[in-house]
Image (tube, helix red, strand yellow):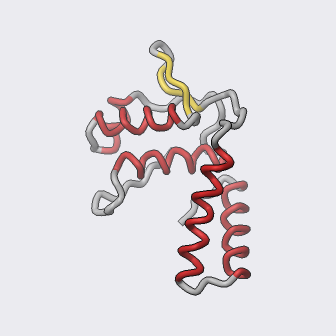
């Protein structure tokens, strides 16, 4: 999986990495049970600190996207049951994104077209943006 990080971004590297992995899972480029590189390997590949990757993996584990086993390493979580707090969290994030769009003059039709386009792109395993 190709991971693109912007070292000049205001967004922390660990969050960028988290988001790239979640996009990979959501688009199907990373499937349930797929292994992720070791912390050290991914840090070396991306040219970042191993603690940054470790923080990302911890966050992904806490959020239910991956599971970590000392023998097998990090893997995309096989159990796809929904986390109980997910719908509420997702709605809060979507509400904020919609509010930002409305504040910038986005219309309902523009929002729905964007939403549908992103949904289709992810369903086809494509990269967004």
Where does residue 39 sit, x and y in percent of width and height?
37, 30
Total numbered circles: 0
Nearer to us in this view, 88 or 60 = 88
54 lies above or below 90: above
Q: Residue furthest bottom?
A: 105
Q: Residue at the spot x=58%, y=73% of the render?
A: 99
Residue at the far top in the pictured view: 71
Given residues 39 and 58, the one toward you in this image is: 58
Q: Is residue 79 left or right of residue 89?
A: right
Residue visible at 61% across and 83% down in the picture: 106
Quarter residue 116 falls in: bottom right
Question: What residue do we see at 68% from left, 37% from top?
Answer: 84
Vertically, is 89 above or below 73? below
**Does residue 31 lie above or below 9 as drawn?**
above
Q: Quadrant of residue 4?
A: bottom left
Q: State the residue at coordinates (67%, 56%).
A: 122
Residue 90: image x %, image y %?
A: 63, 53
User: Looking at the picture, how far across and down is residue 125, in whole percent?
Assistant: 66, 52
């Amino acid at each position: 999986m190709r991971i693109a990080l912007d070292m000049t971004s205001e967004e922390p590297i660990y969050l960028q990495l988290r988001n790239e992995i979640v996009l990979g899972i959501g688009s199907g480029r990373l499937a349930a049970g797929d292994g992720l590189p070791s912390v050290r390997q991914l840090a070396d590949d991306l040219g970042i600190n191993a603690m940054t990757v470790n923080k990302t993996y911890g966050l992904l584990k806490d959020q239910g996207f991956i599971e970590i086993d000392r023998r097998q390493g990090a893997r995309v979580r096989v159990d796809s049951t929904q986390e109980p707090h997910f719908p509420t969290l997702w709605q809060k994030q979507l509400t904020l994104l919609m509010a930002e769009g409305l504040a910038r003059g986005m219309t309902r039709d523009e929002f729905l077209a964007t939403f549908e386009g992103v949904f289709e792109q992810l369903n086809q395993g494509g990269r967004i943006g």
